[in-house]
Amino acid sequence: MSMPTRQQIALYLEDVETPVGIAFNLTIIGLIFLSSGIFVLETYPISEQLRQIFQGIGQITFVIFTSEYLLRLWCAENRLKFIFHPLSLIDLVVLLSYFTAGIADMRFIRVFRSLRILRLIRFVEIKTSLLKISSNDGKILTRIIFTLLTIIFVYSGLIYQVEHPVNPQDFRTFLDSVYFSIATMTTVGFGDVTPVSQLGRLLTVLMILTGIILIPWQVGDLIKQLVKSSNQKQILCPKCGLTIHDRDANFCRNCGTKLNPELTLETNK
C-alpha cells in the first residue's frame, strides 16, 4: 500500500537514499549556493543586463524556496512548532528579504539577505551523507569548516550592507567585507578598515566575541574527538553490529558478545 501524499512528500524533503529525495535536496542546496553567489556578485560593478538576469533568477529561486517552505509547513505534524523552529524562522526571514526587495520602508529586512546561506544548516547532515562522510572525525571537521565559512559569510554580508551605503571607500565589495570579518574575528585588527555606523560597530563587537568564543570551542570539539578516536578501534560485533569499541576491549560494550580480534580494522594506523 502506497504512502499518503503528505507522508511521501515529507520523506522526500529529508531523504537522501531515493533518486527523488537526492535530486530534490541537491536542487535546493544548489539554489542556495546560486542565490548566495548572486548576492556576492551584486556587490561588484556589473552591467544592467546582467543585473536583470540576476533579478530574474532571484524571482525563480524565491518561488521555489517559498514552495519548499509551504511544503514543509504542510507536512509538519505540529505546524505551530515548525513555524517557530529556528531553522524555519531563518527560512522565513530569507523569504521576507526577497519579498521586500522593492519596498523602501522594509530595507532593514533586506539587510538579512546574507542569512540565506544559513539555510544550509538544514542540509548539513544531508551533505555529509551525500559526500559519504561516515566517521565522527570527518563529520566534526566538516561541521567546523562549514560553521566557520558560514559565520564569515553572514558577518561579511551584514557588515557590507550596513557599512557600504555610509562608508563605500572601505567597504566597496563583498571581498572587502570578508577581509574585515576575518581580520576582526581572528582579533588581528589591522585598523586599515573601520566601520563608521553604530550598527557596524555593534557587528564588529559581535565578530570579536564570536572569534574569542566560538572558534576555540569548535576546535576543542575536534581535538577531543581525535583523542577519543585514538583510543578506539573498529571491529564488528557479530550480534548487535556495533563497530566502535575501546582498543583493549574483548567484549562488545553494547551486548557483551565476545569480539573477534581478527575482524579489527584499526582507524588510526
Image (cartoon, rainbow, N blue to C red):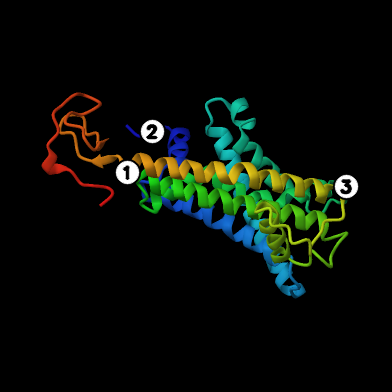
- Residue 41 visible? The answer is yes
Residue type (three-letter) at the residue carrying disc 1: Ser
Disc 1 to disc 2: CB gap under 8 Å: no
Compared with residue 115, is residue 47 higher up or lower down, i.e. above or below? Answer: below
Residue 33: image location, x then y, percent: 57, 58
User: Which marked residue is nearer to the observer: mark 1 or mark 2?
Assistant: 1
Query: In percent of the image, x 56 and y 39: which residue is there?
Result: 71
Q: Earlier in the sequence, mark 2 or mark 3?
A: 2
The quadrant in which the N terminus is found is top left
Q: Which of marks 3 and 1 is nearer the N terminus?
A: 3
SS category of the residue bearing label 3? helix
Q: Measure the C-alpha gap from mark 3 to mark 1.
A: 56 Å
- Residue 56 visible? The answer is no
**For mark 1, does the 10 Å Cα neighbourhood hold few (<14), some (14 to 19), or many (20 or more) residues?**
some
SS category of the residue bearing label 2? loop
The residue lying toward the viewer, choosing from 26 and 1, is 26
Residue 252: image location, x then y, percent: 20, 29
Picture quadrant of residue 238:
top left
SS category of the residue bearing label 1? helix
Residue 35: image location, x then y, percent: 63, 58
The residue lying toward the viewer, choosing from 1 and 247, is 247
Q: Is residue 257 left or right of residue 78?
A: left
Residue 61: image location, x then y, percent: 62, 55
Compared with residue 173, is residue 228 higher up or lower down, i.e. above or below? Answer: above
User: Which marked residue is nearer to the observer: mark 3 or mark 1?
Assistant: 1
Q: Which residue lies under the disc numbered 2? A: 3
Q: Which residue lies under the disc numbered 3? A: 105
Q: Measure the C-alpha gap from mark 1 to mark 2.
A: 45 Å
Q: Which residue lies under the disc numbered 1? A: 230
Q: Is residue 180 left or right of residue 218?
A: right
Compared with residue 78, is residue 115 higher up or lower down, i.e. above or below? Answer: below
